[in-house]
Amino acid sequence: MKRIFITGLLSLLITSVYGQNVEFKSANFKDDKDGLKKATDNIKSGDEFFELGNEAIFQVQSPGLNYELALNHYLKAQEFNPNNALLNFKIGVCYANSPYANKCIPYLYKANELDPSCDHFMNFYYGVALQLDEKFDEAVKAYEAFESEYRKADNFNKFVSKRKRECRDASGAIQDPIRAWVDNVPALNSEYNDYAPSISTDGAEIIYTSDRPNGHTPNKAGSYDKDIYSSSISERKWSAPQQLKGGVNTTSDDVSNNLSYDGTKMLLHREVDGQYDIFESSLNGYNWTSPTTMPFQISSKRANERFAAYSEDGWSIYFNRDNENRSNGFDVMYSSMQSKVQKNYMAAQMISTVNSKFNEGPIYITIDGEKMYIASQGEGSYGGYDIFVSERSQGTWGKPKNMGYPINTPYDDFFFSSTANGKYAYIASNRKGGQGGYDIYKVTFWGPPKAPVMASEDYLLASIVNPMKDNSIESTVEVKKKSFTVFKGKTIDHMTKKPVEAEIEITDNATGKTIETFTTNSATGKFIITLASGKNYGIAVKAEGYLFHSENFDIPEGSADNLVNKVIELKNIAVGSKIALRNVFFDTGKSTLRPESNTELDRLVKLLKDVPSLKIEISGHTDNTGSASLNATLSQDRAEVVVKYLVSKGIAGSRMTAKGYGSSKPVASNNTASGRQENRRTEFEIKAN
Amino acid sequence: MIGANGFSQIEELTPEEQAYRDSIKALNLENEAIANSQEAYNRGIELFTQKKFNDAIKEFDKSIKFDPQFTAAYYNKGVAQNEIQKFNEAVKTLSKLIELKSDYSKAFFQRGRAYQGLSDYLNAELDYDKSIKLDASNPKAYYNYGTLRFLQQDYDGAIKHFSKTIELDADFVNAYNDRGSSYRMKKEYSKALADYETALRKNPKMAFVLNNIGTTKTKMKDYAGALAAFNRAVSIDANFHLAYNNRGVVQMHQNRLDDAIKDFNKALQVKSDYSPAASNISGIYFKKKEYQKALEYANKAIQMDNNNAAAYVNRGMAKEMLRDMNGACEDWQKASELGSEAGQQYYSGNCGI
């Protein structure tokens, strides 16, 4: 590229933060002519390298050390006079074409500010600075201004058009970043260039290249030769990087290309006889063997080869090769073995689908062999090298696609090496924010969009909310307290005390029902039966020729002594016999016959009917309490009521008399309650038979 | 009343008479014990009705002590023990009862229920089966058998038993719901909905059935229908936290993220330790790219229930976006251990290297 220098032409009207353009003229440095002389000499020396550098990049070739060497001179002049537009421009151009590209921005901004017409390429490089600064719209304007001014009939405009396209692509990409983070890895980086990372697929080992000071002799630009370093992961942190042990590193450049997936072999490139060739080294214990040159099909004598990569199956080597006859820079080639034993590689072939008209760079094939990552300065880049991915479909590599922002930026973004699961990758980039020059970056892919787990809950089984209880229980029972009392006794003649066979009828007075009817033993007069406790019973005893006997008695509940033992004395029906009707009851103080009396009276009715000759007197008796006349009246009334009852049952009134004796005929003492009870009675006396 | 004083006592009893008297005495004692047993039993029932189950059990125990053959007392005691979830004791009581009366269908049913309470599904099934064999007309036995089949993911078996329940009692609402849920587990959503709707017709007040309709419609992506069902569910039961939560999920599907958050918050308002709602809020904030909030809510959810797999998944996602990859992987691993497919997927796809 021809450079055109601008001299003179300084607008006096320029005012800015940078002040005025200060020419390297004696008028401006009257007091320091020596300094001016040194500065102008430095500019002159720098210009020689600057020109060479410019020419190289115009031909898509490496500028070599030229810009670095130019810079060494320019920076000295800049120290003397920092306000010269053209010098600022040149320094900017040197940086823009170096690994330290982000350093170009302030110089180019300043040059443009001091004098936008200081150089014909000002607008172009101003555009470059704006592009790196991600001011894409302004960058495009600067490029367009350059295009309108540029009059030379060469094809430089292809670079401009490409730059404009890069700005548009980058602008869109930043609006729509891919799902990944790109993080600087401070543990691996230095203020020098650290690049060409390659990892084992378990992500545990990394090799990379650095031109950090290594104790060797620096080159004439003051830079050290590149050596290969390694580090390993321990507790999720990279260990301090160390130069590879063994015979890999030399005092000239050794650049790592690709670590085999298992971390036991590597490809690297070195400069041999003024051109790059590809070498291979193997891990032997802790040491890497001295690299051997790859066969001529890969490491040719005629061309530069670099950035080789293993194929997933180990049969092929992919690499970059440039071609003197073509102006497309480095292209992607591959060569495959015919036999793994003989390692006889076949002639390398170009993969036309992935190559551009500009330089291709480092290559990486994924462990599944489905994807190839290629760095390229070609179409679709956002500026400098970008990483592209090509997918293999039916044996053919597809058109590479830019991996997108933030993996790619307007700076150089290249090298790619990923873990087996594709979650992490390592790249190199000289983007802003690094530690200096190229740095190693770790890419963390988010993977496919993750959907949060949204929990909904149901009571699918009703019994969870509404337990199916069968808590219906068996129902209550009627408690029957049954206890029995043994009722034992005998019937005897009350006069003779001899046993009498008698007919006994036991009645439940509450219900009037006959419970038992039996006859006592004829020889002994004995009987024994069981009665339910807790009731009042009536007992009626009949025996031939004897007076009917009746009484009522309680059998108490829960009696401990569950035995009632009775002797029943029967009386002959002799005229004059008196029998108390103990089961005849009246309302207290009245002559109203209570219905419980009927059983006893009906028995008397039966006796009178059974023995029609019987004539009786019904007598009422009281105890001695109360008025004697009232007692007499009450006992008379009661006797009459009984007679009336008997008449109502069909007994002739003529057979009966009623007589109230009041308390005049006691049968027991009136001094005791039980005696008084004995005295309160209804009696009948046999008057005739 | 006139007394029995006319009798005089005879002192001696012949040996035969004495033996007779003793036999009557023994009979009296036995009768007294039965009466005591019956009285305790009746008191037990009274206490049971008052839901004083522990006291009821004491009375039934007394009743059994007085009369160890009184099977109804065992049965009631077993039911009372089931009521207070003393399932182990219920099994003992009812086993004793079954020894006494091996054809007591209801006793097998109750013991089945006790076994079910103890998660001893095998024995529970055997008992329900026996109960059904002894009395094929008890819909509850079929129903419980069906729920056991459901819990063991035998949905066809469950459907068969729920259908039999319905055949015996066409108004057995729970059986419709549960059969619907069985169909739903088989992804036969329209059949599921038909059963849920029947249950609802028979008892329109059952909010949980509406909730099931809602979640089923959500699965069918009928979000409008789901929303309507959840709305009805909360109109019946304004404190039905599940329905709020599930409505929130539908709102999320309809991309009304703020409404979704409101619903999840409502669920939390009703039930302050309802972990799924907090986890869901975390998910919404993740969608809104508010990762710090997503993290906070997932933390809350895990605090409420440290076995909430979804909360671990969501927290892992928030942590990843907050650049705590180690934390994210730990959470996904935990979620995976708790049986979350998403946790497993995220862990294997993002971690381990």
Image (tube, coloured by chain):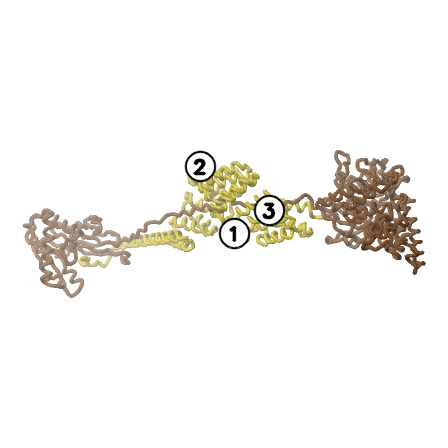
Chain colours: A brown, B yellow
Task: Say if labels 2 and 1 share a chain.
Answer: yes
Mark 3 and mark 1 residues within 8 Å of each other at the beta carbon: no
Residue B112 is marked as none
Q: Is residue A600 left or right of residue B141?
A: left
Q: Chain of mark 2?
A: B
Q: Chain of mark 3?
A: B
Residue B270 - label: 1
Amino acid type, callout 2: Glu
Query: Which residue of the protein is positioned furthest toward the bottom in this rendering?
Result: A671
Kindly identify the amino acid type of the residue bearing the numbered disc 1.
Val
Measured from the top left, where is residue B185 in percent x and y? 55, 40
Give the mark, 2 or 1, whose residue is nearer the N terminus: 2
Residue at 27%, 58% in the rendered image: A561
Circle 2: is it few (<14), some (14-19), or many (20+) Cα within 10 Å? few
Which x, y percent locates residue A604? 12, 50
| Residue B264 shows in the view | yes
Query: Circle 1 sits in a helix, a strand or a loop, which is it?
Result: helix
Question: Is disc 1 surrounded by few (<14), some (14 to 19) or many (20+) residues within 10 Å?
Answer: some
Instruction: Tell me the tag on residue B167.
Output: 2
Mark 1 belongs to which subunit? Answer: B
Quadrant placement of the N terminus of chain A: top right
Q: Is residue A194 above or below residue A334?
A: below
* Circle number at residue B257: 3
